[in-house]
Image (cartoon, grey):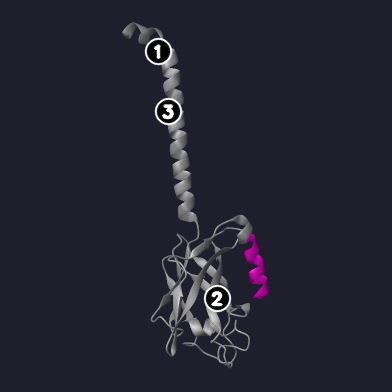
Amino acid sequence: MWNWIASNHQVIGALANIAMLFVWIAYLQVFVSSYRRQKRPNILINRGAGSGLEARCLISNMSAEAIYIESIIATAETTEGRWSSPVTEMLEGRSDLDLKTRQGPLLAGHFVDVGSFESLIDPALPGGAVAPNGLEKLVALELKVVAVHGSEDLLAGATRRFEVIRRPGRLLLKGHSVGTHQIRSRREREKLHDDVEADL
């Protein structure tokens, strides 16, 4: 056997080098994949300080870099249809904890309180939440956050849907899913520009 190895050492060495090359290629792919995952934007939309319409909507930036919130779009789903409206700016004449705009930078690992869910639903409903029967037909609320992430050319985004649960004398909100849906595909991210333009 040693004689065979000695006589074929060049072939064995070449095969070993090829095998090592594939190992390094696989390692590089794992490294690049891990790096890209770390650099991807990760925006969370959560409910806090309550479970009803008075609960606060919290937007967290779990990305590795800071983001800039460009736009927030609320979509109210009722038994009669769906209505969407930008809610980046506060309604004129209203104040929610002195919050005038929901636009601005958000550091990595930080969150921002963008107001109560009622204040987000109100602009999206025809006539507003205070209109007669304004909330009686409400089925769900979907929120979309559009943000600038790092030096990327494409906008980043995330959406989350909250179902309305009716209790005697009260409306509760429950997340449709455990987590926030991250808008990842290039096609979806390109469409985010239309959302921002509608909010200008």
Q: Residues within 10 Å of mark 3 (few under 14, many from 20)?
A: few
Q: Are marks 1 and 2 in contact (CB under 8 Å)?
A: no
For the residues labelled 1 and 2, the Cα–Cα distance comes to 67 Å
Residue 149 marker: none
What main secondary structure does the magenta stretch of the protein show? helix
Question: Which sits in the foreground, 111 or 176?
Answer: 176
Q: Is residue 1 part of the magenta span, yes or no?
A: no
**Dot 2 corresponds to which residue?**
103
Q: Which residue is mark 3?
A: 20
Please report the bounds of the magenta region as a residue range.
Answer: 190-200
Q: Secondary structure at mark 1?
A: helix
Left or right of 12 on screen, residue 152: right
Give whichever of 129, 73 is nearer the camera. Answer: 129
Q: Residue at x 49, y 75 (%)?
A: 163
- Which of the 4 image quarters holds residue 54? bottom left
Q: Pinpoint residue 127: horizontal percent, then vertical percent.
A: 62, 89
Q: Residue at x 39, y 7 (%)?
A: 7
User: The C terminus is located in which quarter?
Assistant: bottom right
SS class of the residue under badge 2?
loop
What is the distance, in whole Å, between disc 2 and disc 3 at their CAs? 51 Å
Residue 188 position within the rendered picture, expressed as x and y whole percent measured from the top left: 61, 60
**What's the amino acid at mark 2?**
Gln
Q: Amino acid at mark 3?
A: Met
Q: Height in image: 35 above or below 191?
A: above
Looking at the image, residue 85 lies above or below residue 170: above
Residue 9: give its label: 1
Quadrant containing the N terminus is: top left
The first of marks 1 and 2 along the sequence is 1
The first of marks 1 and 3 along the sequence is: 1
Query: Does residue 160 appear in the picture of this structure?
Result: yes
